[in-house]
Image (cartoon, grey):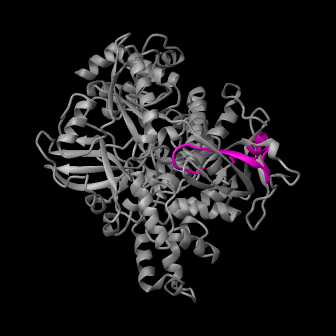
C-alpha cells in the first residue's frame, strides 16, 4: 500500500498521520538534541517534517502544539541546571531545491510588499555542531547554555569557558551592556580523527562523527575533560540584547569579529534569488575542501529592520531558511525487524541493519514507520537494501535491490499482538470514511506495561512534574514491584513506605539519603502550575503548548475540570467554549472528551489532584484597553498579516479566538468577511475595520 497523496487524505486520515508524525519526530528530537545519539538520517527526518508540513498546509485546523512546526529541539538533560534563554533559540525551515530557494526570496518580497525590488542576503555555511548561547553583561561572559528545547537549555558555562575561541571578556567597544551571542560548537576533521585515535588506544568507545563528539565533549560533567577536547566555536547570531548594535546581518558579523569572536570567513553577501543559488553552488563545491563539516547553507535577510518586520511563523523565522545538501547512499542487509511501543500505544517497526559506513558514519538501524511502509517497499528479512543518510545520523531504507534477493529472504508478517508480556491485541483504528489507519496500537492501554511506564515517565519528565531522582530506571523498578501504578501513587510513596517490610532506603541503588532526597523532591512538586498538570496527563494531542493555551483559557483547575467533565457528558456548549480558544480545534476537543469520558481516567486524575495544590494560570496584561477581551479577526487584512494581528492583540493582553461566540468582545473584519461577521452582527458584538483597529491600537 502506497502512501496516500496529501490531496487525497480525508480529515480523519490526516489527523491520524499528524499524530504519528508528531510522536515519531518528538522521539527523534530527544535522540538528537538531548542524547546526542540520533537514530535516523537528516534526510529521513526532513522528509517526515516535509510530509507533516504538507498535511498541515491542507488541514490548518488540525495543527497541534506538538507538531514539529511548533517545537524546537528537545528538553534539556537533567544532569545540568536549566537556563531560560533571554529570547528563544529557534530552528530554521528547510529548502531542498533551487525552486524552494527562489520561493523563499519571493515569499520575503511578497511579505514586505517590495514588488521587484531585490533583497540583500547573507549566505552562511551551516556548521554541523552543537548550538550554544553566551550571555555577556558589561562585556563579561556570565553564562553559557545549550539550545535545549529552544526556551530552556543546559547551563554549561564552565565547559564553554574552556574554549579558546570564546572570549571571557569582549574586546573593543560598541557592544551592548547585555547581549546573548549565539553560535556553533564543533570539531574539525583532523581533531575528530585524533580524538577517536586516542579513544581507540585507550580502549574507549569511538564517536560516530564530529557532531556527536562535539556534543559529548561539551556536555561533560567535569569541565577539565571538556578542556582536553579541541572544541572550536563560530559565532553567527545573537539573542537578547539591551541595545541595537548593527543595521544588517553582515555588519553584525563584523561587529562580533571585532569583539573577539571567530566568524565564518566563507560567509557571503548576495543579492536576490540568483545570488542565493550561486552561493549554494559555491558551498557545495567547497564542502569537501573544508576542515569541518557543513550540511547546507543558511540564507538570512541582511537588513535587520526587515527581519523584524518579517517576524516568525510557528517556531521559525520568516527571514531565514536552511538550504540542505542532498543525501548519501550505501547498500547493506536488513537482518531483522523489531517492534517498539510508544506512550500512546503506537507500535513502530525498526529495521536492524548489518553495520555499514555511509558518509564516514557506521549505521545499524532505521525506523520503518509502520506495517504499510514495510509492505509498500516489499521489505523482507535478509534483503539487500539501499540506505540513505545526510549529515551524521542513521539512515532510512530507500528500497530493495531486487536483483540480489535470494530464496532465503523472508516476508515480514506484522504481529497481531503487542510484544509486551500480556500479549494484548494490536488494532488499527477506523477513520470516518471506514478506512483503516496505518498505525497499529496496543489495545491494552493502561494494562500494557509499555504504555503504563511510558505514561509515568512522561508524568515525571522535566516539562511535566520534573521530579528529580525519579527517572526511567527507578520508575520501572517501582512499577514492577507494584509500588507505583499511576501518578497519584508517587505522592503516596512516603506514607506507604512506613508500612513496607522492605523500605525504599533498602532497595538496590537507593540508600537512606537517596530515599530521603526522593521524598523531598516529590513533596516539592505537590504545588504545580495548571499548564504543567494538564500536559503531564499525557492525553493524546495535548502537548506543552496546548497545555499553556488551555490553562490560560480556563485560569483554574476547577474551571478546566468542570468543562472537561461537561464535555465528557455530551455538553455541546462546553465543547463550543473550548473550540473558541485560539489554536484549540476539534482534534484536541475529541481526545479530551474521550479521555475524560473514561471513568478510570477521571478517577485516576481525581486521586492525583487530591494530592496537589494547583496554581492558577498566569494572568494576562491588565493595564491596556484590550486586556482580557476576546478578539476575532476575519476577512482579508490588507495592512498586516493575520499572524501580525494576532501577535499585536496578544501583546496588549487580549485573547484571540478563531470563532465568534457570545463571549467575543470585538470582531475586526476585513474585505470578504462572511459568516463570522454575520454572527457578530446577530449577537450585537462590536465590529470594526482594520484601519479602525490600527488607529485604536496606536492611540
Q: Where, by quadrant of the figure, is residue 225 drawn?
A: bottom left
- Membership of 378 in magenta stretch: yes
Residue 411: where, in percent of width, then height? Answer: 84, 50
In the depicted structure, whether residue 43 falls above or below residue 367 = above
- Membership of 575 in magenta stretch: no
In the depicted structure, whether residue 425 falls above or below residue 99 = below
Badge count: 0
Q: Where, by quadrant of the figure, is residue 667 drawn?
A: top left
- Judge by depth and name the residue closer to the eye, 27 or 651: 27
- Judge by depth and name the residue closer to the eye, 366 or 471: 366
- Judge by depth and name the residue closer to the eye, 378 or 594: 378
Q: Residue at x 10, y 41 (%)?
A: 173
Q: Where, by quadrant of the figure, is residue 255 drawn?
A: top left
Residue 283: where, in percent of width, then height? Answer: 42, 33
Q: Residue at x 45, y 15 (%)?
A: 636
Question: In the picture provided, is 51 more to the left or to the right than 159?
Answer: right
State the extent of the magenta-drawn residues as a range.
368-394
Residue 183 visible? yes
Q: Which residue lies furthest to the front in this view?
A: 289
Residue 169: where, in percent of width, then height? Answer: 16, 52
Q: Residue furthest left?
A: 173
Q: Which residue is drawn at 41% across and 59% down?
A: 528
Residue 685 visible? no
Question: In the picture provided, is 208 more to the left or to the right than 274?
Answer: right
Amino acid at each position: 500500500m502506497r502512501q496516500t497523496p496529501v490531496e487525497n487524505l480525508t480529515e480523519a486520515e490526516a489527523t491520524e498521520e499528524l499524530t504519528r508524525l508528531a510522536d515519531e519526530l518528538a522521539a527523534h528530537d530527544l535522540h538528537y538534541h538531548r542524547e546526542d545519539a540520533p537514530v535516523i538520517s537528516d534526510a529521513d527526518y526532513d522528509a517526515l517534517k516535509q510530509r507533516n508540513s504538507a498535511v498541515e498546509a491542507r488541514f490548518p485546523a488540525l495543527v497541534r502544539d506538538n507538531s514539529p512546526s511548533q517545537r524546537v529541539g528537545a528538553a534539556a538533560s537533567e544532569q545540568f541546571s536549566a537556563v531560560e534563554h533571554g529570547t528563544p533559540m529557534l530552528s530554521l525551515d528547510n529548502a531542498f531545491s533551487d525552486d524552494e530557494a527562489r520561493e523563499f526570496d519571493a515569499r520575503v518580497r511578497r511579505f514586505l510588499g517590495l514588488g521587484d525590488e531585490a533583497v540583500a542576503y547573507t549566505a552562511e555555511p551551516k556548521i554541523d555542531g552543537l548550538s550554544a548561547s553566551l550571555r555577556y553583561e558589561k562585556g563579561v561572559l556570565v553564562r553559557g547554555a545549550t539550545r535545549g528545547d529552544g526556551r530552556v537549555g543546559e547551563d554549561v558555562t564552565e565547559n564553554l569557558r574552556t574554549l579558546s575561541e570564546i572570549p571571557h571578556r569582549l574586546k573593543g567597544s560598541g557592544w551592548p551592556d547585555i547581549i546573548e551571542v549565539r553560535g556553533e560548537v564543533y570539531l574539525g576533521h583532523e581533531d575528530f580523527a585524533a580524538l577517536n585515535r586516542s579513544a581507540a588506544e585507550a580502549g574507549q568507545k569511538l564517536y560516530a562523527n564530529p557532531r556527536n563528539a562535539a556534543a559529548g565533549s561539551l556536555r561533560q560533567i567535569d569541565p577539565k575533560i571538556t578542556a582536553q577536547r579541541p572544541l572550536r566555536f563560530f559565532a553567527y547570531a545573537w539573542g537578547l540584547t539591551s541595545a541595537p548594535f548593527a543595521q544588517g546581518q553582515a555588519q553584525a558579523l563584523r561587529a562580533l569579529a571585532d569583539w573577539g569572536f571567530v566568524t565564518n570567513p566563507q560567509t557571503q553577501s548576495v543579492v536576490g534569488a540568483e545570488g542565493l543559488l550561486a552561493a549554494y553552488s559555491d558551498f557545495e563545491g567547497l564542502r569537501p575542501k573544508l576542515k569541518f563539516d557543513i550540511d547546507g547553507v543558511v540564507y538570512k535577510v541582511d537588513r535587520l529592520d526587515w527581519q523584524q518586520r518579517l517576524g516568525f511563523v510557528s517556531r521559525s523565522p520568516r527571514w531565514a531558511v536552511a538550504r540542505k545538501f542532498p543525501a548519501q547512499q550505501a547498500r547493506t542487509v536488513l537482518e531483522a525487524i523489531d517492534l517498539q511501543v510508544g506512550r500512546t500505544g503506537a507500535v513502530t517497526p525498526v529495521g536492524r541493519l548489518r553495520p555499514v559506513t555511509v558518509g564516514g558514519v557506521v549505521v545499524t538501524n532505521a525506523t520503518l514507520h509502520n506495517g504499510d511502509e514495510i509492505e509498500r517497499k516489499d521489505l523482507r528479512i535478509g534483503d539487500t537494501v539501499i540506505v540513505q543518510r545526510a549529515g551524521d545520523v542513521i539512515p532510512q531504507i530507500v528500497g530493495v535491490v531486487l536483483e540480489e534477493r535470494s530464496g532465503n529472504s523472508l516476508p515480514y508478517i506484522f504481529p497481531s499482538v503487542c510484544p509486551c508480556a500480556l500479549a494484548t491485541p494490536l488494532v488499527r483504528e477506523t477513520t470516518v470514511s471506514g478506512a483503516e489507519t496505518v498505525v497499529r496500537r496496543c489495545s491494552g492501554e493502561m494494562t500494557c506495561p509499555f504504555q503504563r511506564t511510558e505514561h509515568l515517565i512522561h508524568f515525571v519528565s522535566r516539562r511535566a512534574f520534573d521530579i528529580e531522582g525519579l527517572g526511567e530506571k527507578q520508575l520501572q523498578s517501582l512499577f514492577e514491584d507494584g509500588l507505583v501504578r499511576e501518578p497519584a501513587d508517587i505522592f503516596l510513596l512516603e506514607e506507604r513506605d512506613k508500612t513496607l517490610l522492605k523500605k525504599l532506603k533498602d532497595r538496590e541503588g537507593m540508600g537512606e539519603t537517596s530515599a530521603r532526597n526522593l521524598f523531598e523532591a516529590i513533596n516539592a512538586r505537590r504545588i504545580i502550575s495548571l499548564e504543567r498538570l494538564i500536559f503531564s496527563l499525557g492525553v493524546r494531542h495535548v502537548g506543552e503548548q496546548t497545555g499553556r493555551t488551555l490553562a490560560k483559557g480556563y485560569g483554574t483547575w476547577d474551571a478546566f475540570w468542570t468543562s472537561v467533565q461537561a464535555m465528557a457528558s455530551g455538553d455541546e456548549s462546553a465543547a463550543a467554549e473550548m473550540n473558541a480558544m485560539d489554536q484549540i480545534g476539534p482534534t484536541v476537543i475529541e481526545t479530551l472528551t474521550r479521555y475524560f469520558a473514561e471513568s478510570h481516567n477521571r478517577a485516576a486524575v481525581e486521586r492525583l489532584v487530591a494530592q496537589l495544590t494547583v496554581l492558577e494560570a498566569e494572568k494576562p496584561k491588565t493595564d491596556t484597553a484590550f486586556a482580557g477581551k476576546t478578539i476575532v479577526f476575519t476577512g482579508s487584512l490588507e495592512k498586516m498579516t493575520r499572524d501580525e494581528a494576532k501577535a499585536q492583540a496578544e501583546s496588549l493582553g487580549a485573547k484571540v479566538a478563531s470563532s465568534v461566540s457570545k463571549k467575543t468582545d470585538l470582531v475586526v473584519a476585513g474585505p470578504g468577511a462572511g459568516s463570522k461577521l454575520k454572527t457578530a452582527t446577530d449577537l450585537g458584538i462590536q465590529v470594526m475595520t482594520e484601519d479602525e483597529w490600527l488607529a485604536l491600537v496606536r492611540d
